[in-house]
Image (tube, helix red, strand yellow):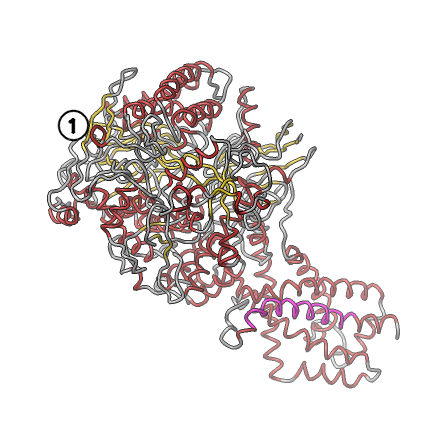
């Protein structure tokens, strides 16, 4: 199939960006979205032009590196997939595809479609951990955890940190991301001990970094490739109030 | 302590509490307003008088005004922060599936605010003596206003927008307060499962019934009296 | 032989580690702060080592090429992590885990290291649990386990099909804690371009800032490489596409011996290649073989849909050939068996290069819900990629390059042949012999990082406490930085037509065809020739737009591919040298009449450690003889 791509090109963080238009011939339905971009880049390099820069690594939907805003949706219009898993069979001949980087103040563009997501690391560094040194842990089965809760903790902990929630939210809020981490620890007995310090520190850091506020629109949940639920945000709210 | 009070979550918490408080006030207001439909002005004026003079109501009134002010100022403040959080928008639009009216809260809120200003000039400021008029006969003030077509148009539009505002506001407040699930689990297990739908349905009923009630009064007085 | 001192402690196997720890030299807490350690890589072993060393009080600098340490490729491990907890009361023990690994590795691993890996496995599980890794649990609240290929006990702890992600996030969280405390300084988006060796000791690294393109010098008292394996040498593999061997290769060229490079594990259960543009083969966890049955039609080129082929016309070839282990034979065995069927013309799918992995019986027996609980996310992933629903029809799978048992040679202390340079996790060669058993890579990586290295490194550092902070304005740093820039400039100045990726793809094809699941002398010789030709072409016709001083992903790729050309030659040299079949290394010339691997313990019970002899010169082979004191070398049989 033939496609028209409108891709955000920006040389570096300081440069002004523009949308460039590329015509693609012979795009196969079997390609993944990133493989389609690989093909574009191959052409560009062949013409000695700067290829489109984008983050990607595992290409199996788990590392959270890839992420671009495709036709009005983070990771494209198909629910519950990352960009690397987005198949070109969801597009048709003649389509025009808009490809943009995540847009949020705390995620400045580095180049083209690559943004700086270190804000997420900073939030985790603020308190996204359980304080235990290697060697100090008790026998694993001495910590019993209710299966249901532990399964729920798992459901929250599968966040891949891609930033789609922030990209989707009209307020560029990071609540879903933060709430997923808070929930994972809040639901496990190991995590309860420093739950108060954790939630305070992480929320404070989140605010400081300039993310917007949650207005419960639900866009994050709709776009999360790992289908992290809004109930996590509610839990984060509770955990936060409980911390004071 | 400042960090706690002024964190994004605390602001939202206050917003939600203030909002819920306003939600409780609306049905009371509606019930009193329904008395406007009677041809006898006495019950309405008596109720208005009661509301204006009874000490307990006076205290609630202060709280109400505070809630309104907080809800508005935090609302605007948070919205500005939200805009600042995305300095560059998307050329391809934002097509994520959302709770629809959640996208326009600031605008539906702003129109309600516009109405509120008008409303204060028409009634509340009379009561406070800031604007000339007879605070003991709001019945006729109201009836006179509903004779003006332009007023009715504004009134009806604002109440439709209020309904849209309320619809999202209701479940959003529960989510923000952390009440959207689990907390009820110990009471009735089944309730836990149906809690979210219950909130949604209640929000729907509330956000239709309340504005519809006000609109009904407006339409009746305007078109049929 | 002289150069390889494995430093295995004296004493009975089960007491070596305890004795070692009791006698190892220590560094005084006050001195630790003054000692700097560089850790390259942030996977289970890298993040584990960085955080454990930080917890001890050392000043750690941690590097990764990704934008965040949370993206290291350990994140993609699916099935589980082994430990000898014996929670199932099924006869498991440290010794049995050790024995399974030795046997699974086809007697080509070092006994003492393997035993230690088994020994610390329990600590690893304790630690991860304490860190809040949400492992699967039973209703009573205790941890659940499942069984995995190549063993007869249930010792694999898991978090659905995302165990690697959960363990990595656990490591990431402990790393974050040390970053917050200031004990670890994190350098993301950095690529290591060279190792600095001063007076024979590892003293730092040269990195390139991948955003600005700037060259950076970092000095330290010791350097730890946790840079993973070289599976992407096949281009298509289950690895992250940016995974590479460049850091390890640079260290190798600076004097670290490279051991057993030909030992590459081909994973049997991957989504087969669907088209020519494919950039990646996705792994479907081996745990699927617990409930899935592998089969092909009994008739050649049977094109009927799988569900229409009746039971009696199906060949469950793993169950047929290996009745004792059935579908749970080790990976190398399962991979070759699938290849054998496909080569014989029984393969399924468009290309005939895949076999069925069928859950029909398991779903009928346990119910769809139970299967969904165990493998839900894998089934979804499969459906996303292929468009076919594994609940309705069998998955189609085919082997793909996955894990490299080979790596930098290390002694018992995990130190390479360069003093002060350590290699942990997949980057070293030590624990898996010629074949790795499922769920033991997370175990080894985390064990190395959290529990082994922090104990052994002090033995070296205790003598370094008088060495002041390493300054980076020395001739060694100067020269290394200059050489790194020169190499990049050379790549940029080729100015041909083709992309680095296209060369990589062609290299991968050669490697897969001639040095993949099975090898033979003629093929290997041919591959050597083809690689040299391709390498010449690479240096004539490569094109990289842009410059060195900016974010330039083509330049990054080209650098990695250029290293792969060199490593590929060594891999093949090693495969040619090893005239036997063992584990994942299957030389067609050396097999039993029924097609099983034929080991030659007389001549090849050694670790082949290769020394770099200089540009264009053949590598020098050093042999570390493997002595088995506790186990007897047997023919590995899963029949």
Left or right relative to C227: residue B131: right
What's the chain of the residue with tag 1?
C
Q: Residue at x 63, y 46 (%)?
A: B94
- Viewer-closest of C49 and C273: C273
Residue C429 in percent (x, y) is at 27, 35
Q: Main secondary structure of the magenta part?
A: helix
Residue picked out by circle 1: C3
In the displayed structure image, the side of residue C355 where residue C15 appears, left or right: left
- The residue range painted magenta reads B191-215
Q: Quadrant of residue A10?
A: top right
> Which quadrant holds residue C66?
top left
Q: Residues within 10 Å of mark 1 (few under 14, many from 20)?
A: few
Say above or below: C555 vs C56.
above
Q: Look at the numbered disc 1 and give the secondary structure of its residue.
A: loop
For the view shown, which residue lies furthest in the right direction?
B224
Image quadrant in which you'd find residue B157: bottom right
Q: Position of residue C426 (x, y in %)?
A: 32, 38
Q: Is residue C472 above or below residue B207?
A: above
Which of the two residues, C493 or C469, is positioned nearer the viewer here? C493
């Amino acid at each position: 199939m033939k496609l028209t791509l409108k891709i955000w090109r920006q040389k570096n963080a300081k440069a002004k960006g523009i949308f460039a238009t590329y015509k693609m011939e012979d795009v196969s339905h079997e390609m993944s979205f990133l493989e389609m971009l690989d093909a574009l880049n191959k052409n560009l390099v062949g013409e000695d032009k700067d290829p489109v820069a984008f983050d990607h690594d595992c290409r199996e939907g788990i590392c959270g590196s890839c992420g671009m805003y495709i036709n009005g949706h983070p990771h494209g219009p198909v629910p519950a997939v990352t960009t690397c898993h987005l198949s070109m069979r969801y597009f048709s001949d003649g389509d025009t595809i808009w490809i943009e980087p995540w847009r949020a103040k705390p995620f400045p563009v580095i180049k083209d479609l690559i943004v700086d997501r270190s804000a997420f690391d900073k939030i985790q560094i603020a308190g996204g951990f359980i304080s235990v040194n290697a060697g100090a842990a008790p026998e694993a089965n001495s910590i019993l955890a209710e299966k249901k809760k532990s399964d729920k903790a798992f459901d929250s902990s599968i966040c891949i940190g891609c930033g789609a929630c922030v990209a989707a939210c009209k307020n560029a809020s990071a609540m879903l991301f933060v709430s997923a981490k808070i929930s994972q620890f809040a639901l496990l007995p190991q995590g309860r001990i420093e739950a108060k310090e954790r939630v305070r520190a992480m929320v404070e850091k989140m605010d400081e970094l300039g993310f917007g506020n949650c207005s419960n629109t639900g866009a994050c949940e709709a776009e999360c490739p790992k289908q992290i639920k809004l109930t996590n945000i509610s839990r984060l709210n509770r955990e936060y109030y409980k911390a004071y | 302590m400042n960090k706690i009070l002024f964190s994004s979550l605390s602001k939202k918490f206050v917003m939600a509490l203030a909002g819920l408080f306003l939600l409780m006030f609306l049905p009371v207001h509606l019930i009193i307003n329904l008395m406007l439909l009677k041809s006898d002005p006495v019950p309405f004026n008596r109720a208005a008088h009661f509301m204006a003079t009874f000490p307990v109501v006076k205290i609630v009134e202060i709280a109400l005004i505070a809630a309104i002010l907080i809800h508005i100022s935090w609302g605007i403040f948070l919205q500005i922060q939200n805009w600042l959080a995305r300095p560059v928008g998307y050329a391809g639009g934002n097509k994520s599936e959302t709770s629809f009216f959640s996208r326009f809260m600031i605008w539906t809120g702003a129109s309600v605010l516009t109405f509120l200003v008008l409303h204060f000039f028409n009634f509340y400021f009379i009561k406070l003596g800031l604007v000339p008029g007879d605070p003991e006969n709001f019945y006729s003030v109201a009836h006179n206003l509903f004779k003006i077509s332009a007023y009715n148009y504004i009134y009806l539009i604002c109440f439709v927008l209020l309904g849209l505002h309320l619809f999202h506001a209701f479940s959003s407040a529960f989510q923000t307060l952390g009440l959207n699930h689990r907390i009820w689990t110990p009471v009735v297990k089944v309730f836990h499962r149906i809690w979210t739908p219950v909130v949604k349905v209640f929000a729907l009923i509330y956000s239709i019934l309340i504005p519809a009630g006000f609109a009904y009064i407006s339409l009746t007085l305007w078109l049929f009296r | 032989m002289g150069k390889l001192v494995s430093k295995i402690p004296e004493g009975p196997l089960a007491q070596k580690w305890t004795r070692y720890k009791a006698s190892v030299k220590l560094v005084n807490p006050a001195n630790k702060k003054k000692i700097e350690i560089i850790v390259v890589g942030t996977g289970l072993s890298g993040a584990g080592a960085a955080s454990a060393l930080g917890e001890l009080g050392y000043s750690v600098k941690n590097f990764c090429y990704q934008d965040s340490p949370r993206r290291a490729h350990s994140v993609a491990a699916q099935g589980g992590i082994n430990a000898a907890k014996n929670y199932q009361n099924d006869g498991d023990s440290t010794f049995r885990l050790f024995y399974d690994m030795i046997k699974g590795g086809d007697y080509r691993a070092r006994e003492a290291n393997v035993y230690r890996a088994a020994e610390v496995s329990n600590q690893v599980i304790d630690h991860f649990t304490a860190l809040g890794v949400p492992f699967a649990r039973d209703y009573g609240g205790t941890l659940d386990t499942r069984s995995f290929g190549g063993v007869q006990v249930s010792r694999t702890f898991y978090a659905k099909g995302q165990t690697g992600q959960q363990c990595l996030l656990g490591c990431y969280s402990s790393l974050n804690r040390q970053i917050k405390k200031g004990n670890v300084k994190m350098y993301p988006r950095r690529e290591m371009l060279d190792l600095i060796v001063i007076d024979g000791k590892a003293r730092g690294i040269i990195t390139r800032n991948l955003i600005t393109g700037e060259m950076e010098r970092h000095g330290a008292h010791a350097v730890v490489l946790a840079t993973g394996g070289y599976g992407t040498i096949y281009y298509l593999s289950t690895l992250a596409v940016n995974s590479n061997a460049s850091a390890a290769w640079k260290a190798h060229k600076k004097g670290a011996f490279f051991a057993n490079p030909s030992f590459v594990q081909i994973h049997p259960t991957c989504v087969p290649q669907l088209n020519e543009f494919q950039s990646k083969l996705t792994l479907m966890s081996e745990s699927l073989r617990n409930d899935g049955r592998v089969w092909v039609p009994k008739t050649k080129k049977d094109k009927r849909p799988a569900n229409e082929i009746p039971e009696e016309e199906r060949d469950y070839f793993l169950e047929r050939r290996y009745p004792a282990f059935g579908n749970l034979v080790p990976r190398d065995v399962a991979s070759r068996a699938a290849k054998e069927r496909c080569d014989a013309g029984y393969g399924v799918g468009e290309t005939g290069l895949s076999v069925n992995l069928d859950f029909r019986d398991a779903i009928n027996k346990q119910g769809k819900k139970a299967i969904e609980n165990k493998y839900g996310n894998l089934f979804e992933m499969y459906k996303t990629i292929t468009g076919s629903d594994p609940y309705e029809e069998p998955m189609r799978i085919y082997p793909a390059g996955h894990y490299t048992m080979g790596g930098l040679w290390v002694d018992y202390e995990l130190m390479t042949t360069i003093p002060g340079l350590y290699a942990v996790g997949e980057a070293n060669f030590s624990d898996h012999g010629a074949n790795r058993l499922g769920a033991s890579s997370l175990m080894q990586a985390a064990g190395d990082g959290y529990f082994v290295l922090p104990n052994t490194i002090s033995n070296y550092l205790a003598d370094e406490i008088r060495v002041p902070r390493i300054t980076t304005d020395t001739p060694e740093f100067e020269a290394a930085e200059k050489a790194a820039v020169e190499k990049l400039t050379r790549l940029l100045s080729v100015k041909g037509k083709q992309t680095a990726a296209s060369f990589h793809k062609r290299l991968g094809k050669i490697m897969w065809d001639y040095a993949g699941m099975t090898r033979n002398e003629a093929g290997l010789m041919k591959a050597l020739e083809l690689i040299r030709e391709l390498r010449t072409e690479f240096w004539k016709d490569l094109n990289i737009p842009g410059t060195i001083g900016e974010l330039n992903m083509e330049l990054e790729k080209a650098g990695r591919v250029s290293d792969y050309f060199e490593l590929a030659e060594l891999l093949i040299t090693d495969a040619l040298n090893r005239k036997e079949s063992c584990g994942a290394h299957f030389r067609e010339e050396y097999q039993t009449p029924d097609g099983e691997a034929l080991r030659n313990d007389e001549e090849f019970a050694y670790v082949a450690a290769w020394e770099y002899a200089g540009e264009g010169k053949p590598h020098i082979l050093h042999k570390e003889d493997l002595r088995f004191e506790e186990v007897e070398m047997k023919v590995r049989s899963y029949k």
